[in-house]
Amino acid sequence: MNKFLFTTVSVIALGFGSSAFAAGSSSYTNQSGNNQQATIDQSGGDFNKVGTLANPFAQDDGLYSGGNVISITQTGGTVGSNQFGVSEQSFQSGGANSANISQTGVRNDAVLQSTGYGNGYGANSISQVGDSGHVSLKQTGNFNAFSINQAGGSDLPNGYGISGIPTDLGSVFFAKQSGDANSVSSSQTGWQLVILSQTGGYNQLYNTQTGFGNSLTASSAYSDPAVQSYDGSGASNVISNTQTDSNQTLYVDLQYGHANNITNVQSNFNNLAAVYSQSGYNLTINNTQSGQNNFAYYVQAGSQTSATVNQTGNSNTASTTQNASSSSSSITQGGNNNNATVTQNGAVAYALFTTINQGGNGNTATSTQSGSTNAANIFQSGSDNKTTSTQAGTWSFAQLDQSGGGNTIVGSQTGSGYAQNAAYVTQVSNTNVANYTQNGSGNYLNVKQ
């Protein structure tokens, strides 16, 4: 027997609750005013729902003072899904609202939309335990925060579901926040996908994924690209991503503003990290990848940018492009088929710094810099090493060291007039070749073989 409950409350400081234990329980709510509370317990059975019949749940506060609370427990769902919002609406408006959603079972779906300020601070979370869960969080306003916890894999066949997201990915979390000082904390275990969109300043994403097929994505292939962007109200945005076990991916389409930071830690083994655009000034990217087929690709534009890549083990590739002045790039690769490419340039580029450390096996390093007062340091150790460093402008410095194996260095520093470029080349053991070109006057070249 199905149970349906529809309640409307339009009084300040009143609460609403329902409890259902049969299969297929449904509950709708609609509350207006301040300090509303809704506690809903749907334990047992399949296809439990909170929301609809033309949309409710909605805790609306026209005075924008809020203090509304929604607490939902849905268990069961061994055959079909528990649902909150039932694929969109849901809602809280005003300030200092909180929501705690707990779902257990397969194919759980939770949607929370809220407008206002300070929503979600405190013990506010959506928790899903079971395969193929989906969470959609959309918040508009400032100082909003939320914690998402998902555990489970996929029980769905290949195909496409909500917003074109592949249904075979297991747990999916979609977050969209507009405003300043918003934060999202996500923890997922199993097969997972996180899609993020944050607009404003001082926003933060903290993501931890454990299991197989982990992905934090900014891909515009989905309905809303996952980005952090600066709209004039601030910056200091943060993306912090930790992924363990196999098949990890990080994609960021855009992080725009100043004092932004991306930190990525991936461990063993099919790691991939790509940031297609981080632009502004005072930007930082830190990437650590350990174990087997690692790849890293970053593009930064503006000024005072920094990118650090640490890869250890096996078929590593790292490429960093910085179209900015006062920028630095550091790439460390340890072991096996390493390849590192750094390109730094800009219309008014100066103070560009590159450091590449490669240890072991088929290493290739290429660093291209333009402007003046640049420095390139490339160190290669072991096997089939090759170094190409091109610097354009004046007051540039290059230190290129190779030890062991079939080493090759091709240099080239360019500049006109009193260039004062300097290059130091050291090759130790085996088939060494050095080829260097310097233009202008006042240049210095030191080659030791």
Image (cartoon, rainbow, N blue to C red):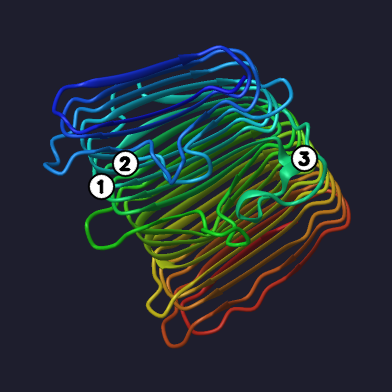
Secondary structure, mark 2, is loop
Callout 2 crowding tier (Cα within 10 Å): few <14, some 14–19, many ≥20: many
- Name above or below for residue 103 compared with residue 116: above
- Residue 368: image x %, image y %? 59, 69
Q: Which residue does the numbered mark 1 point to in the structure image?
A: 141
Residue kind at label 1, given as amino acid type: Gly
Residue kind at label 3, given as amino acid type: Asn
For the point 30% across and 54% down, the residue is 200
Residue kind at label 2, given as amino acid type: Asn
Tell me where residue 243 sits by quadrant.
top right
Callout 1 crowding tier (Cα within 10 Å): few <14, some 14–19, many ≥20: many
Along the line of sight, which residue is nearer the eye, 41 or 270? 41
Along the line of sight, which residue is nearer the eye, 415 or 20? 20
Marks 3/1: CA–CA distance: 38 Å
Marks counted in the figure total: 3
- Name above or below for residue 341 compared with residue 81: below
